[in-house]
Amino acid sequence: MGSPDVAVVGGGIVGCALAAFLAEGGARVTLYEREALAAGASGRNSGIVQHPMDEVLAPLFHETVAHYRDLAAFGFALPDSPAGLLVLSPDERLIEEELALIGDGFPELAIERLAPGEPHRLEPVVAPGLAGVRMETGYAVPPAEATRAFWRRAEAAGARLVLEPAGADVAADQVVVAAGPWTPGIADPSGAWRPIEPLWGVNAEIHLPEPPRHAVEEAGIDALLAEGAAGGGLFSLVTAQGVSSLGSTFLPEEPDAAARAPRLKERGARFVPALAGAPIVSVRACARPRSADGRPLLGRRGDLVIAAGHGAWGISLGPASARLVADLVLGREPAIPAAFDPARFG
Ligand SMILES: Cc1cc2nc3c(=O)[nH]c(=O)nc-3n(C[C@H](O)[C@H](O)[C@H](O)COP(=O)(O)OP(=O)(O)OC[C@H]3O[C@@H](n4cnc5c(N)ncnc54)[C@H](O)[C@@H]3O)c2cc1C
């Protein structure tokens, strides 16, 4: 058989999109996945394609939306327009902090400040008395579908799937490591290079007869992720094609997902009271590949190419990152912003 031109390690959203772009660009591609396609966060996330509210990351989001439109031919349907995102809090100060962090640099978000009680008028399933912000973003999608559709596209272009673990020494002219939070362990088994750490989340699939139309989440993510914070939980609720995903936790160690589920419900019911009586259908845990500065690592490191570290934003940004990395591997004009260079971490 000889060596494949390009080996991609990891069958998540980034690896599957890479396999598609590389194969369409003429490379002979083998994708190595140790478990199953979308076995990691790419199959277990909350399912929202959302603006990252970071000017360096925003272009990746806009390009990703365009890639998802192109996936229609492979069975993936991005909603025509965003559902809208409601960020809620009983504490108006947290809403002010959220607004200050976002700034006024994103007119496309059409940010609306909502006084206490307004979120309830806009979305009656939301508890009365909460303050909030509404933003024009948030395409709700079933968690694993984009990844699977990218794989179908890759396969149609000739990519090959090998369901076994691979390391940096896998036979190929070029090796791209797109293994989410496991990427540093593959790139540097010595353990010295660890710019990406897992940040574990638990999500429950829950049955709500009348789910909110918006994606809904609790304000306060920055305080929770601040340096030195022990991690914890913040409410979020996303409904795609009638299936609601209730989240989530932000924890450094893998949690007992089933044990966390009642706490997710209890916290969620403060924001959407109907959650208290809603049956949980299933619970899942997965790890966000969180980089030390919140931005992905895209580019060469020694003999390897790295494509990982999207943290909480991989479904929203991963396909555009994959396109940038595919262009690098294919020898096209490199256009990867310096902010994503893996060398910033040594
Ligand atoms: C609870 C939760 C909710 C989230 N919600 C959202 C959301 O709503 N919107 C959003 O944009 N993002 C969300 N995210 C983030 C998003 O899911 C991730 O950023 C994204 O899925 C990461 O994709 P990836 O391809 O880099 O990694 P992964 O999905 O982790 O894929 C890596 C793959 O590599 C494989 N692998 C590992 N080691 C090897 C090896 N040695 N050989 C072969 N294969 C290997 C793994 O099995 C895995 O399948 C969420 C994350 C969590 C945890």
Image: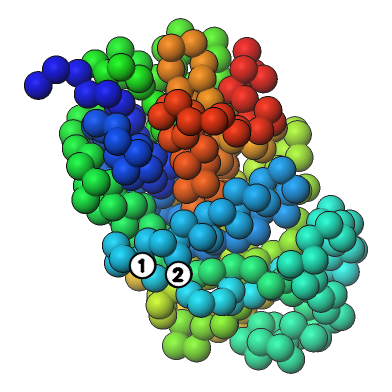
Residue under the image location 45 percent in, 73 percent down = 240
Residue with the most extreme left position: 1
15 above or below 204?
above
Residue closest to the eye, 122 or 295: 295
Horizontal and vertical percent for residue 339? Answer: 69, 31
| Residue 72 badge | 1
Amino acid, disc 2: Leu
Left of 104 or right of it: where is 254? left
Task: Let me know if residue 276 appears in the view.
Answer: no
In the rendered image, which residue does mark 2 sit on?
A: 78
Q: Is residue 169 left or right of residue 341?
A: left
Mark 2 near mark 1, Cβ–Cβ under 8 Å?
Answer: yes
In the image, what residue occupies the spot 74% across and 74% down? 134
In three-dimensional space, the C-alpha distance between marks 2 and 1, rounded to whole angstroms, equals 8 Å
Whether residue 114 is visible to the viewer of this picture, yes or no, is: yes
Q: Secondary structure at mark 2?
A: loop
Residue 14: image x %, image y %?
43, 42
Helix, strand, or loop for circle 1?
Answer: helix
